[in-house]
Amino acid sequence: MNEIEAFDAVRRSLKKRRFEHTERVVEEGEKLANRFNVNVEKVRLAAILHDYAKYRPVEEMRNTIINAGLEERLLDFGDEILHAFVGAYYLEHELKVADRDVLSAVKYHTTGRANMTGIEKVVFLADYIEPGRNFPGIEEVREIAKLDLDQACFMALKNTIGFLVKKGQPVYPETFEAYNYYSNDLK
Ligand code: DGI
Ligand code: FE
Ligand code: FE
Ligand code: FE
């Protein structure tokens, strides 16, 4: 899968607004990858593909989790996390993406996880801070992202968990594990 093929696939799968978000994640991801010495080609490909499943019907994604034998607890933490995990599965099986580094960056782009690879961190963060985003506290994350990749991921995780808790929504355990990991000297 090259970039042209990847862009074609997501142009067909995404609405215009989401495709434009994707283009900004690619740009932001490239900047972060250069800044923190992460593989730019892999980051760009993962960023192009990261929201591939965003508009799949929720019922289809839930069925895929069950039928493909993905972790069933994914069903218990809100529909927003499904497109990341199911997206990685669809990319592997529908588009025959074989690069594990790219697939894992897509898989963890929404929740994060403890001990992320550089590619995972960059895609996770680029999705959070791309210039079209406007979350409370985002400017501070953008500033730290100029200096410290782990600290910026920590702040994004902290803000996301705070947002979910305020709304009374469940938090996927790996998001907490990521938060704990990057809050400590575990890294
Ligand atoms: O797909 P995007 O909109 O570009 O961004 P995303 O994939 O980061 O999804 C963001 C949404 O996912 C947002 O509504 C918060 C939600 N989210 C992130 N982590 C968790 C989560 N939702 C739950 N329930 N649990 C999580 O750990
Ligand atoms: Fe997403
Ligand atoms: Fe995100
Ligand atoms: Fe996204």
Image (spheres, rainbow, N blue to C red):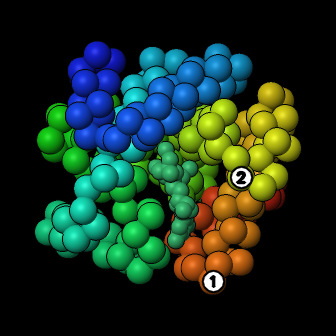
> Residue 63's image quarter?
bottom left
Residue 84 x/y as whole percent? 40, 53
Horizontal side, residue 130 vs residue 58: left or right: right
Q: CA distance from mark 2 to mark 1?
A: 18 Å
Label annotation for residue 168: 1
Label annotation for residue 65: none
Residue 39 visible in the displayed image: no
Residue 66 x/y as whole percent? 20, 72
Q: Residues within 10 Å of mark 1 (few under 14, many from 20)?
A: few
Residue 178 x/y as whole percent? 64, 59
| The N terminus lies in quadrant | top left
Task: Indicate which label's residue lies in the foreground, 2 or 1.
Answer: 2
Is residue 57 depicted above or below 91 in this figure? below
Horizontal side, residue 104 vs residue 4: left or right: right
Whichever of callouts 2 and 1 sits on the residue coming sooner in the sequence is: 2
Is residue 131 depicted above or below 138 in this figure? above
> Residue 51's image quarter?
top left
Residue type of the residue flagged with mark 1 = Gly
Which residue is at 63% across, 83% downward? 168
Which residue is at 40% across, 69% downward? 79
Which residue is at 32% across, 40% downward? 14
Residue pointed to by mark 2: 135
Residue 25 x/y as whole percent? 54, 32
Residue type of the residue flagged with mark 2 = Phe
Label 1: state its secondary structure.
Answer: loop
Which residue is at 65% across, 78% downward? 167
